[in-house]
Amino acid sequence: MLRAEDNEILTRVGPGTLMGDLLRRYWTPACLTAEIPQPGGDPVRVRLLGENLVAFRDVRGRTGLVQENCPHRGASLYFGRNEENVPALRCVYHGWAFDVDGRCVDMPSEPAPFCEKVRMKAYPTHESGGIVWTYMGPPQTMTPFRDFGTEGRDASEFIVAKQLTTCNWVQSMEGNIDTAHISHLHQFDGIDDIPDDGSDKPGYPSNAMSWKFWRHDRAPRLEVQDTWYGYKYAGIRTTPNGNTHVRITAYAVPYSTMVASIPFTSGHGMFVPIDDENCWRYIMLPKDRQNPRNLGGANLFSVAPFSTPITGRRDGIIPRLYTMDNDFRMDRVAQRGGIFSGVSDFVSQDFMVTESMGTIYDRTQEQLGSTDKAISRMRHILLSAAKGLAAGKEPPALGGDLDYRSIRGAEKILEPGEDWRILGTDDDPIVQEALGIEPPLPAAD
């Protein structure tokens, strides 16, 4: 369990809070490129880290992220005009116009304009991988953009989407780094009828057999390895044939998760705070899954009774069809015989449990077990970084020159004596094969 004061630090993200100050030191998703696709198009509201903002793309194609309220009399710039003749967003109240840097560039309502004296809050933006990212921290500490593999590539090469979650960001993220729950929450009775395809042996099993492994061993052993970017951990299960199956998930400070997949993945799940009580769940997946020889075979959901893994659309803002208001469309008949949770949408099963805790769960009530090691470690890293920043210590994993592209999740049945820590790294033979990485030469005698 956490002390009440630490739970407050962990969950509060507004300006001036310890965690809010920490998160503002990292480049953070502000919105999708798909939300402001056209130069001179409509602005969109953005609420991020407790601040009300407006994003827009000016007639020159530059992206801007500015405070929502005009600094003149406070009218919302969401209703502003994205001007065709001047690269600025113009307030419809008195016509003051502001560019992407927050500078007032026109003030027609004033007989003696004082544009050079008026400036509004504006945050730097960077577009990459179908996401408009922003830096909200002190200008003097802004670091280069952290490239997780999107720089130099067209946005069309990625599946990018986001979905609203009505609970605190840490609460939502904890579900993604919890390997134990897949042996319970996401189970369905039909797993017992999946035929044994012979892949329960050292090497890469089929995705279908992975369901059987999760169901067979419902108490995984966790091993956590600290890294420069946060940590990665293995959920270790024994298969029906007595082999050692590992699911390796990486956590990169502050809100990024790369969840286990066969054979490895750089697919990104990010939990971005809207405010203390809501967050966006972003996904960013390369369309080329970098899976040589089609290891794992058919999609993980090909044998599952869940209609879709993420509620329909796989681009843009994904609608919430399963919510607390409709009890996540729970089917009690299906729960008694068929789907363990009674909820037929996979990701909505996660939403059900994390949102049912309340918007901010009181972690002083928790009774944690051995399968909660990864969650405890994430909290410790975030709390230490937030308190350290307040004491003048530089946060971890900030440098733009660090190799964020090499952070990956992985899944495999281990060979005898094989170290799970190699899986998904540049030293992993399957990663080298997929990405064309030359293995290191053997050391000279």
Image (cartoon, rainbow, N blue to C red):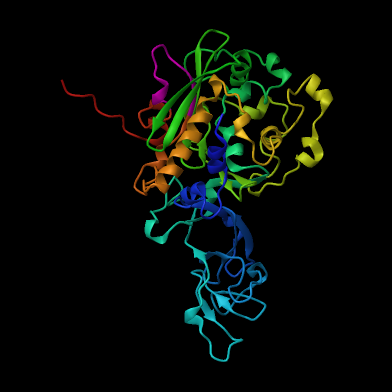
Q: Is residue 419 magenta?
A: yes
The residue that appears at 23% across and 24% down in the rendered structure is: 442
Q: Is residue 376 magenta?
A: no
Vertical placement of residue 73 versus 137, above or below? below
**Magenta residues, start to end:** 410-423
The residue that appears at 57% across and 91% down in the rendered structure is: 111
Q: Residue furthest left?
A: 445
Asked whether residue 263 appears in the rendered view, the answer is: no
Residue 122 place in picture, x, y as percent: 51, 65
Quadrant location, the N terminus: top right
Q: Residue furthest top?
A: 241
Q: Residue furthest right?
A: 333
The residue that appears at 50% across and 11% down in the rendered structure is: 243
Q: Nearer the viewer, residue 340 or 423?
A: 340
Lateral position of residue 152 relative to residue 201, left or right = left
Quadrant location, the C terminus: top left
Residue 42 place in picture, x, y as percent: 64, 66
